[in-house]
Amino acid sequence: MSKNSTEFRLNIGIILMNEARNVFWGQRVQKDAWQFPQGGLDENESTVDGMYRELYEEVGLNSDDVEILAESKHWYSYRLPTQFIRRSEPKIFGQKQKWFLLKLISEDNCICLDSTEYPEFVDWIWVNYWYPINNVIFFKKKVYRKVLAEFNKFLLT
């Protein structure tokens, strides 16, 4: 099997921003890794529907808890390093992601990390908008830099 674009899992990435323009930063379950919420798109699922599903599964928020500020103009991709490629079939060599910038319009206490049977995060904090670029796992840095740069104009509004 060749490493072409069909072996990149379609995925949604979510940047959740509060009124102070800080962003949600979540610690992954059983890992010392922090990241934005993200997850795969189901077959025939729209990007918006997938985003709302992932938002609920990972952060416990619903559509009435947030306002969509932006959807990325492009799909952003990254390759997984060899040690992170699962042995499943078909092999997935990376992620192809559509990103959303959301503004939290509910209170912080509406965030619930255990809204599903298998939580993705064990902890979370609000961080400076640019903090994730230097603190995400190395193979996601380029995508984070591009997405944050694309959405940067919403810090000024």
Image: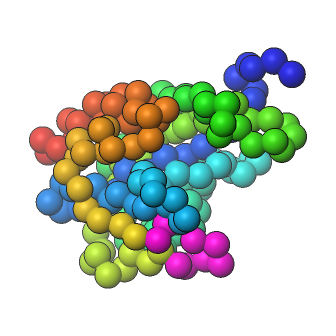
Q: Quadrant of the N terminus?
A: top right
Does 121 lie within the magenta span?
Answer: yes
Q: Pick the residue in front: 100 or 9.
A: 9
Percent x, y of residue 13 = 49, 46
Percent x, y of residue 15 = 37, 50
Q: Pick the residue in front: 66 or 21.
A: 21
Percent x, y of residue 14 = 44, 51
Q: Pick the residue in front: 82 or 7.
A: 82
Q: Pick the residue in front: 66 or 55.
A: 55
Left/right of residue 7 with respect to residue 115 in the rendered view: right
Magenta range:
114-122
Percent x, y of residue 55 = 50, 63
Left/right of residue 34 with respect to residue 51 in the rendered view: left
Q: Quadrant of the C terminus?
A: top left
Q: Residue at x 54, y 65 (%)?
A: 29
Q: Residue at x 72, y 51 (%)?
A: 42
Does 1 lie within the magenta span?
Answer: no
Q: Residue at x 70, y 23 (%)?
A: 5
